[in-house]
C-alpha cells in the first residue's frame, strides 16, 4: 500500500432523496382543509397582513374625463443645460416620423401609433418655465448627465412636481461614453439609480443612452425609449382633471394695424390655438395665463384637428404599423406644419401647384357638400339617429336576433330597409315579426331538421352546447361569491363608471356644434380662443421656448381673499423665513407675490403669530391671495431671478381654509404698579389711560412678578386709568402687576402677479420682485437699527435698609441667653499685625531672589520644549520603523500563502 497518497473518506449522504420525500409526506397532513389552521395567532397575523396589503392598494376612485379620442399627452424633456435634451427630442421625432427638425422651439405634436399622440416640450433652466411644465406634463423625461450626477435643477423640479401633483417621471442618463472604466461605469449607474429611486419611488424606470454617433443617440436605444412611452399608463392629476387648460402651439395678433401704428403700446387682440385638455371649456369663461394675468374669453370655437389620429381601418385590412401618410407632425413654432413664427412676421406656407386639388371642394354648394359627407361617412345613419344598440335589429338572417333587445324595439319613425325592387326584404319581415308573436307569418316556417345551418343556430340552447358567460351557472355562482367580497370602494368605482358612461351616451349622437352648447368644449378638440385687452408685451416679447398656458378658472377662483395654509420651510433651504417678508407662491395656475404671516395653532384653537418659521415642523401661513380650492398644493420662492448655486425652493404647503378676514393674534402684556396696598386689595395705576379702557377689561386676570393672582374690579376716580383690584394674598408696594392680553394682527393686502412672459426675450428670468427689508439694507449698506430698549439691561434694585427688630423687654426676659439680643459689638477674627519695613539690603536680596526664580522658570520652559520636540521626533521614527515592519510582515505573509497555494496545487 502506497502511504504517500492521501485517502479521503467517501461522501455518504444522510438520507436519499426518495427517503426524504417519504419522510416529508409522512409529516405533512393528508387533509389540508382539516388542518388548515394550526395556530390561531399565526392565522390572525396572516389575515391582518393580508388586509393591510389590501388597504394600502386602495385608492379613491377618480373620474376619468378623457374622451374616446383624447388630446395628445404632454411629454416634457427636463434637465440642466448641456445634458442632451434637444438631441433626445430630435431622436424621438426621427423615430416616429422619419423627419429631421433642426430647430426645437415650442410644442411639437406627433402621432406615435393608431391610438396615441404626444406633444413634446423642452423645458429650459428658468424656474418659471419649470413650474409651468410641472403643472401640464403627463410624462417627464428627466435627463441627467451621468458624468456629473444630479444637479440642483433636477432636485428643484422634483420638489415642484411633488407640490403640484406628481406626473409620471422616467429618468434618462446621458454622457455614459465619458467613462472608460467599465467597473466605474457600473458603480456610477448603481449609485444614480438608487438616488433616483429615493426621490421618485423604488423601481422607477431609468434609461441609459450609451453614446453619440454623428451627433445622434443610437436608434435602438431611442426606439426602446419610444416603446416605453407608448405603453405607459398616464395618471390624471386632480387639478388638471377639474380645470380646463390649453397649451398654445400657435398665436396670431388680430389687432388692427392702424391702432398699432398710432399707439404701439396699445392692448392687443390675440388668437390662441391649441388642444383642449382637462375639463370642458365654457364660453365667456375666465382664464389665467401664467406669467401674464387674468382674462375673459371673447370667443371660442373648435377647428379641424391639424394632427389627427389615423382613421379606423376595417378588420380585414388592419395593420400593426402606421402608414407613411399617417405619420403626422405639427409644430408651427418650429417651422413644421405650414406656419413659421418669426420675430416680426408670421410666414404661412401656401403650397405649390399640388395644393390646388382641394379647390374643387370649395366650389361645391352647401347641399352638395352635405351629400358628399353623407356618402363618405363610414358610420350608418341609423347609428347616428338611434344609437349603437339599434343596429342589431337591422342584421341579415344569418345572425340570430338577440332577445335582450326587445325593450328598445318600440322607437319612433324607424324605416324598414328595402331591396332594390322596392319590396320589403324577407330578413326584415322575419326580424320585425319575430318581435311580435301574433304576426308571425306561416310562409316563414322552417324545417330545422333538414337545414344544418339552423341546427347549428339552436345547438347552444341545450345543456350540451356552449352557453354564454352571462347564462352559465358556474359563472353566475362565482360572480355571486365575488360580490360578497366587494367593499365600499368598489361600489364607488362602479357608480362613477356608470355615471361617466351615461354622460357619454347622452351626447354621443349629438352634432358637435350642438353638443358644445350643453357641455362645453371637451378635451381633445383643437380650439381657437380669442382674448382681448392683452398687454402688447406678450406679443412683442414672445419667446416660443416658454410655454403659454391658458388655464380655466372656476367661478369662485376669480376672487381674492385671505388664504390660510399649512406651510413648512424646506429642509434644503439655508435661510429662515420671517413674517411679512414677501414670497413668490405658485398656487394653481397662478404665480404671484404676497406677504405671508406665520402662526401656530394652540390647543385652544388660537392662531398665535410667529416671527419666524419653526425648524423641522409645520406652521400656519395666512396671506392675501386668490381663492383656491382646499387641499391644493403650492410651492414658494423668495427670489426667482437670483443666480445662485443654492437650493431656491423656500417652502411648500397646502391650502386649508378660505376666509374674508384673518384671525391671527399676538401677545400684548400690560404693566401696572400699585398705588396703594391694603390687605388683599390694591389700587393699580400706569396700566390704562382712561376709565373706559378699565371698564372693557373688568374681570380680567392679573398676576404679579411673585406669582400672586388677582382680578380687575372697578375703576377709581383719580388718577385716570387707575382701578381697584383684588388678589389672593397681600402684595408688596414695589411689585409689578401684569395683564396678559391678545390683539388681532391685520394681514397686509398685498398681491402682485408675476408677469415674466411680459419681460424682454433676454430678460425672461430677471423679473424684479418686491425685496425683503434685509435685502434692501444689504444693497444700500444700511445697518440694522438698534433700539436700546431691546437689549437686556442689568436690573438696578434699591438697597433697602431694614429697621432693627424691636423685642419687648418682657419677652427678652423669657428668652434664653442664646436668643437674647447682644449689645456688645461682634469681635473680628483678624489679628492686627505690625507692618515690617525692609532696609536697602533686604530689598536687593528680594529682587535677586525674584530674578533667579524667573530665570529658573524660563530655563525649565525651554528644557520642556526641547524634550517635546525630541519626543515627537522619536515617535515619528518609531512609526516609520513600525510601518516598515508591517510592510515586511505583509510581504512575508504573501510569500507564505503563495507557497501554501503551490503546495495544494501539487
Image: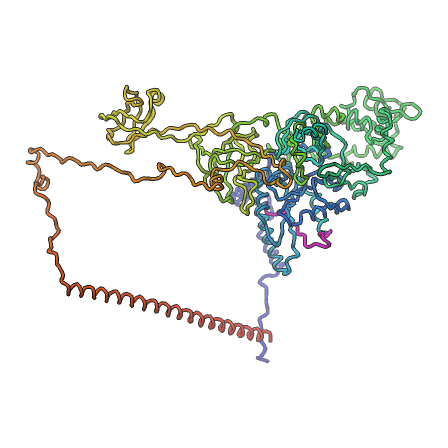
Residue 209 among those drawn in magenta: yes
Question: In this rendering, would 816 be left or right of 726?
Answer: left
Which quadrant of the rendered structure holds the N terminus? bottom right
Residue sitting farthest toward the front: 262
Above or below for 780 versus 260: below
Residue 580 visible somewhere in the drawing: yes
Q: Position of residue 382 (x, y in %)?
A: 81, 26
Q: Is residue 469 above or below residue 889?
A: above
Could you tell me what secondary structure mostly forms the magenta stretch? Answer: loop
> Where, by quadrant of the figure, is residue 250 drawn?
top right
For residue 881, above or below residue 141: below
Residue 807 relative to residue 630: left or right: left
Residue 760 found in image quarter: top right
Which quarter of the rendered picture does the C terminus lie within? Answer: bottom right
Furthest toward the right, the residue is: 421
| Residue 364 at x, y percent in the picture | 87, 27
x, y percentage for residue 386?
78, 24
Specify the quadrant of the image occupied by residue 792.
top left
Q: Nearer the viewer, residue 63 or 540?
A: 540
First to last magenta residue range: 200-219
Where is residue 639? Give x, y as percent: 54, 40
At a point 49% along the width and 73% down the height, the residue shown is: 888
Q: Is residue 62 visible?
A: no
Q: Which of 889 and 491 is in front in this view?
A: 889
Front one among 40 and 884: 884
Q: Does the magenta stretch include residue 59?
A: no
What residue appears at the point 57 percent right and 75 percent down from the top-left corner?
903
Amino acid at each position: 500500500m502506497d502511504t504517500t497518497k492521501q485517502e479521503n473518506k467517501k461522501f455518504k449522504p444522510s438520507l436519499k432523496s426518495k427517503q426524504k420525500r417519504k419522510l416529508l409526506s409522512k409529516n405533512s397532513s393528508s387533509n389540508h382543509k382539516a388542518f388548515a389552521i394550526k395556530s390561531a395567532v399565526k392565522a390572525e397575523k396572516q389575515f391582518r397582513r393580508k388586509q393591510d396589503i389590501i388597504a394600502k392598494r386602495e385608492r379613491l376612485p377618480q373620474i376619468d374625463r378623457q374622451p374616446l379620442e383624447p388630446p395628445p399627452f404632454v411629454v416634457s424633456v427636463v434637465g440642466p443645460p448641456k445634458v442632451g435634451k434637444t438631441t433626445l427630442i430630435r431622436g424621438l421625432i426621427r423615430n416616429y416620423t422619419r423627419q429631421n427638425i433642426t430647430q426645437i422651439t415650442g410644442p411639437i405634436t406627433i402621432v406615435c401609433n393608431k391610438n396615441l399622440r404626444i406633444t413634446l416640450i423642452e423645458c429650459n433652466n428658468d424656474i418659471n418655465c419649470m413650474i409651468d411644465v410641472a403643472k401640464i406634463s403627463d410624462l417627464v423625461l428627466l435627463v441627467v448627465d451621468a458624468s456629473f450626477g444630479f444637479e440642483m435643477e433636477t432636485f428643484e423640479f422634483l420638489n415642484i412636481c411633488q407640490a403640484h401633483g406628481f406626473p409620471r417621471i422616467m429618468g434618462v442618463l446621458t454622457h455614459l461614453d465619458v467613462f472608460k472604466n467599465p467597473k466605474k461605469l457600473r458603480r456610477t449607474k448603481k449609485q444614480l439609480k438608487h438616488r433616483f429611486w429615493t426621490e421618485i419611488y423604488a423601481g422607477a424606470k431609468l434609461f441609459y443612452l450609451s453614446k453619440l454617433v454623428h451627433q445622434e443617440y443610437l436608434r435602438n436605444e431611442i426606439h426602446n425609449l419610444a416603446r416605453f412611452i407608448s405603453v405607459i399608463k398616464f395618471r390624471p392629476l386632480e387639478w388638471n382633471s377639474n380645470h380646463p387648460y390649453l397649451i398654445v402651439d400657435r398665436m396670431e395678433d388680430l389687432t388692427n394695424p392702424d391702432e398699432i401704428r398710432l399707439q404701439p403700446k396699445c392692448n392687443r387682440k390675440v388668437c390662441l390655438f391649441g388642444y383642449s385638455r382637462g375639463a370642458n371649456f365654457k364660453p365667456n369663461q375666465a382664464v389665467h395665463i401664467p406669467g401674464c394675468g387674468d382674462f375673459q374669453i371673447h370667443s371660442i370655437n373648435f377647428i379641424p384637428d391639424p394632427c389627427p389620429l389615423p382613421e379606423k381601418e376595417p378588420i380585414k385590412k388592419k395593420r400593426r404599423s402606421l402608414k407613411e401618410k399617417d405619420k403626422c407632425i405639427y409644430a408651427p413654432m418650429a417651422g413644421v406644419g405650414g406656419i413659421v413664427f418669426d420675430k416680426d412676421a408670421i410666414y404661412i406656407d401656401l403650397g405649390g401647384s399640388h395644393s390646388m386639388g382641394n379647390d374643387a371642394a370649395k366650389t361645391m354648394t352647401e347641399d352638395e357638400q352635405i351629400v358628399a359627407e353623407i356618402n363618405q361617412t363610414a358610420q350608418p345613419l341609423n347609428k347616428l339617429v338611434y344609437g349603437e344598440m339599434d343596429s342589431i335589429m337591422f342584421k341579415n338572417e344569418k345572425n340570430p336576433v338577440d332577445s335582450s333587445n326587445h325593450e328598445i324595439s318600440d322607437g319612433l319613425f324607424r324605416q324598414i330597409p328595402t331591396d332594390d325592387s322596392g319590396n320589403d326584404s324577407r330578413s326584415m319581415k322575419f326580424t320585425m315579426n319575430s318581435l311580435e308573436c301574433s304576426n308571425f307569418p306561416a310562409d316563414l316556417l322552417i324545417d330545422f331538421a333538414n337545414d344544418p345551418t339552423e341546427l347549428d343556430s339552436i345547438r347552444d340552447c341545450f345543456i350540451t352546447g356552449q352557453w354564454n358567460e352571462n347564462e352559465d351557472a358556474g359563472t353566475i355562482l362565482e360572480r355571486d361569491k365575488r360580490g360578497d367580497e366587494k367593499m365600499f370602494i368598489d361600489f364607488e368605482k362602479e357608480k362613477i363608471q356608470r355615471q361617466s358612461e351615461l354622460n357619454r351616451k347622452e351626447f354621443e349622437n349629438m352634432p358637435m356644434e350642438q353638443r358644445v352648447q350643453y357641455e362645453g368644449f371637451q378635451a381633445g378638440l383643437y380650439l381657437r380662443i380669442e382674448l382681448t385687452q392683452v398687454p402688447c408685451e406678450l406679443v412683442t416679447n414672445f419667446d416660443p421656448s416658454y410655454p403659454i398656458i391658458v388655464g380655466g378658472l372656476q367661478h369662485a377662483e376669480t376672487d381674492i381673499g385671505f388664504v390660510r395654509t399649512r406651510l413648512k420651510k424646506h429642509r434644503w433651504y439655508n435661510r429662515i423665513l420671517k413674517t411679512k417678508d414677501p414670497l413668490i407662491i405658485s398656487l394653481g395656475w397662478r404665480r404671484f407675490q404676497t406677504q405671508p404671516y406665520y402662526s401656530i395653532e394652540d390647543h385652544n384653537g388660537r392662531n398665535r403669530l410667529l416671527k419666524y418659521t419653526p425648524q423641522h415642523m409645520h406652521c400656519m401661513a395666512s396671506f392675501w391671495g386668490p381663492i383656491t380650492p382646499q387641499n391644493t398644493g403650492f410651492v414658494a420662492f423668495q427670489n426667482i431671478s437670483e443666480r445662485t448655486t443654492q437650493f431656491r425652493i423656500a417652502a411648500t404647503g397646502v391650502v386649508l381654509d378660505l376666509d374674508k378676514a384673518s384671525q391671527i393674534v399676538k401677545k400684548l402684556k400690560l404693566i401696572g404698579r400699585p398705588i396703594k396696598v391694603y390687605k388683599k386689595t390694591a389700587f393699580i395705576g400706569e396700566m390704562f389711560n382712561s376709565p373706559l379702557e378699565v371698564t372693557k377689561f373688568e374681570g380680567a386676570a392679573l398676576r404679579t412678578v411673585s406669582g400672586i393672582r388677582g382680578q380687575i374690579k372697578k375703576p377709581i376716580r383719580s388718577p385716570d386709568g387707575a382701578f381697584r383690584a383684588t388678589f389672593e394674598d397681600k402684595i408688596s408696594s414695589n411689585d409689578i402687576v401684569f395683564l396678559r392680553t391678545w390683539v388681532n394682527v391685520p394681514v397686509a393686502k398685498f398681491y402682485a402677479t408675476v408677469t415674466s412672459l411680459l419681460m424682454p426675450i433676454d430678460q425672461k428670468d430677471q423679473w424684479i420682485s418686491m425685496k425683503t427689508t434685509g435685502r434692501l439694507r444689504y444693497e444700500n449698506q444700511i445697518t440694522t437699527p438698534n433700539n436700546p430698549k431691546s437689549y437686556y439691561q442689568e436690573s438696578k434694585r434699591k438697597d433697602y435698609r431694614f429697621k432693627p427688630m424691636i423685642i419687648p423687654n418682657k419677652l427678652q426676659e423669657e428668652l434664653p441667653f442664646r436668643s437674647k439680643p447682644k449689645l456688645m459689638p461682634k469681635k473680628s477674627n483678624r489679628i492686627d499685625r505690625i507692618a515690617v519695613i525692609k532696609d536697602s539690603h533686604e530689598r536687593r536680596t528680594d529682587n535677586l531672589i525674584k530674578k533667579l526664580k524667573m530665570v529658573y522658570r524660563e530655563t525649565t520652559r525651554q528644557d520642556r520644549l526641547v524634550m517635546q520636540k525630541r519626543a515627537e521626533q522619536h515617535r515619528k521614527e518609531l512609526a516609520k520603523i513600525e510601518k516598515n515592519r508591517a510592510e515586511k510582515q505583509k510581504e512575508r505573509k504573501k510569500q507564505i500563502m503563495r507557497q501554501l497555494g503551490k503546495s495544494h496545487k501539487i
